[in-house]
Image (tube, grey):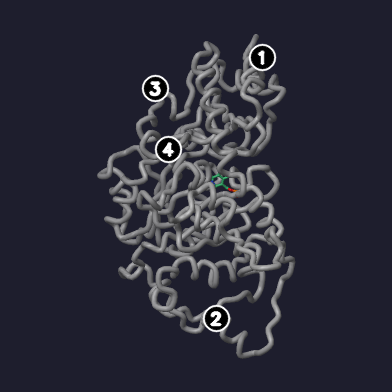
Amino acid sequence: MPWKIETKCLQEGYKPENGQPRVLPIYQSTTYKYDSTEHVAKLFDLSVPGHMYSRISNPTVECVENKIAALEGGIGALCTSSGQAASLISILNICEAGEHFVCSGTIYGGTINLFGASLKKHGISVTFVDQDSSEEEIQKAFQPNTKALFGESIANPKISVLDIEKFAKIAHKNNVPLIIDNTFATPILLRPIEYGADIVVHSTTKYMDGHAVSIGGVIVDSGKFNWDNGKFPGLTEPDDTYHGMVYTRDCGKAAYITKARVQLIRDYGCYMSANNAFLLNLGLETLHLRIERHCRNAEKVAEYLSTSDKIMSVSYPTLAKDSYHSLAQKYLPKGCSGVVSFRIKGGREGAVKFMDKLKLAAIVVHVADCRTAVLHPASSTHRQLSDEQLVQAGIDPGLIRFSVGIENIKDIIEDIKQALED
Ligand SMILES: *Cc1c(COP(=O)(O)O)cnc(C)c1O
């Protein structure tokens, strides 16, 4: 019987043999020694497994990749230097200049920038859609040159829940993969591949690391998408920079994730370091415990806030009146992560006053780590967005994103209570 997810958090990835270190070692080496040129040639042909250079792969990082692939139910994974790099590579791997993809407008502000502004300068265009629209409405955004559909399972910071099955249906009808950013949910709460997603990306910087010590990202390949449908010549035709490799022919189910590594990571150089992978692995070992506590604490914070007359509205999908409640019941039965967002009375000014009075909850430009933290998107992470884009991403000037930690819930509620007092 396959291991349960809690066991996978601890036991997958690194499997030491007799006499080897119990704990995943940090292979702090840029390169690897071989006895013959013939062996190295085989490595380059990918006909034998092994490491060549730590810009492309590293034994420490590889163990963490295997663990995350096992957690998400994918056939392979690739760790990147940041969540941004994971989102970028996930698109660049299948979308070239002159091509297009469709993306939910309700996603992390940094991803909106990356897709809407930076990729545009490289000739890749995106159409942002309202993820709550009907299939017919979203279908209108598709063009003959569309190569992917992208969305966030729990959107940062709106805390909306994506109907992944609806998105998968639309993507597959158009013969393109569905890519899901699963950062907030983590595979503990939701595994998008089980609902039809083809590729999953994460900012491991958030809950997976969980202690705010290392920036990182990961791409997981389900191995299920059929790339050989005429739309993805980069995967089905010879790669001249890789001596004629045809990824679908030579790598089978692992075509996408192999190309991402040996072509894109090789060239763009945004691989995770061994040190960061070691830290990420420590975080992953307790992910299941932390996520459970984050969820229980956040549920109590959301309930408390929703009874306060100082608060205009609370977004947290376990609340019965939340507009994403029924989607959360389907996709997130174990909980909805530790992030609660709410609108305080008094708009921007009210938000700033509340934030400055908090004692335990720290003002940081970060979210989803074990310590309670608070952020005002309109004056920080989402500063670069126009008012129109703010509204599209579901952000009100008085919106506060409260990242509930794993401290004692009584202390967290007490802190909120004193900060809301006049
Ligand atoms: C933070 C975040 C990212 C970007 O990740 P970095 O590790 O900061 O580069 C992407 N998606 C979501 C949902 C995030 O919260």
Q: Residue at x 28, y 48 (%)?
A: 140
Of residues 248 and 87, the one drawn nearer to the viewer in this rendering: 248
Looking at the image, tell me whether mark 2 or mark 1 is earlier in sequence order. 2
Q: Is residue 208 above or below residue 98?
A: above
Q: Residue at x 57, y 37 (%)?
A: 382
Residue flagged by tag 1: what amino acid is it? Gln
What distance separates the C-alpha of mark 4 from that of mark 1?
Answer: 31 Å
Q: Residue at x 67, y 68 (%)?
A: 18
Q: Nearer the viewer, mark 2 or mark 1?
A: 2
Secondary structure under the numbered disc 2 in the rendered image = loop
What distance separates the C-alpha of mark 3 from that of mark 1?
Answer: 26 Å
Q: Nearer the viewer, mark 4 or mark 1?
A: 4
Q: Tell me whether circle 4 and circle 1 mark residues in contact (CB < 8 Å).
A: no
Looking at the image, tell me whether mark 3 or mark 4 is earlier in sequence order. 3
Residue flagged by tag 4: what amino acid is it? Leu
Q: Which residue is mark 1?
A: 418
What distance separates the C-alpha of mark 3 from that of mark 2?
Answer: 55 Å
Q: Nearer the viewer, mark 3 or mark 4?
A: 4
Is ligand 1 within 8 Å of the beta carbon of the residue shown at mark 3?
Answer: no
What distance separates the C-alpha of mark 2 from that of mark 4?
Answer: 40 Å
Q: Quadrant of the N terminus?
A: bottom left
Residue 48 numbered tag: 2
Q: Is residue 313 left or right of residue 147?
A: right
Instruction: Give x and y (percent) for residue 204.
Output: 59, 49
Residue 266 numbered tag: none
Q: Tell me whether circle 3 and circle 4 mark residues in contact (CB < 8 Å).
A: no
Instruction: Give x and y (percent) for residue 329.
Output: 38, 33
Q: Which residue is mark 4?
A: 332
What distance separates the C-alpha of mark 3 from that of mark 4?
Answer: 16 Å
- Disc 3: CA contacts within 10 A as few (<14), some (14-19) or many (>=20): few
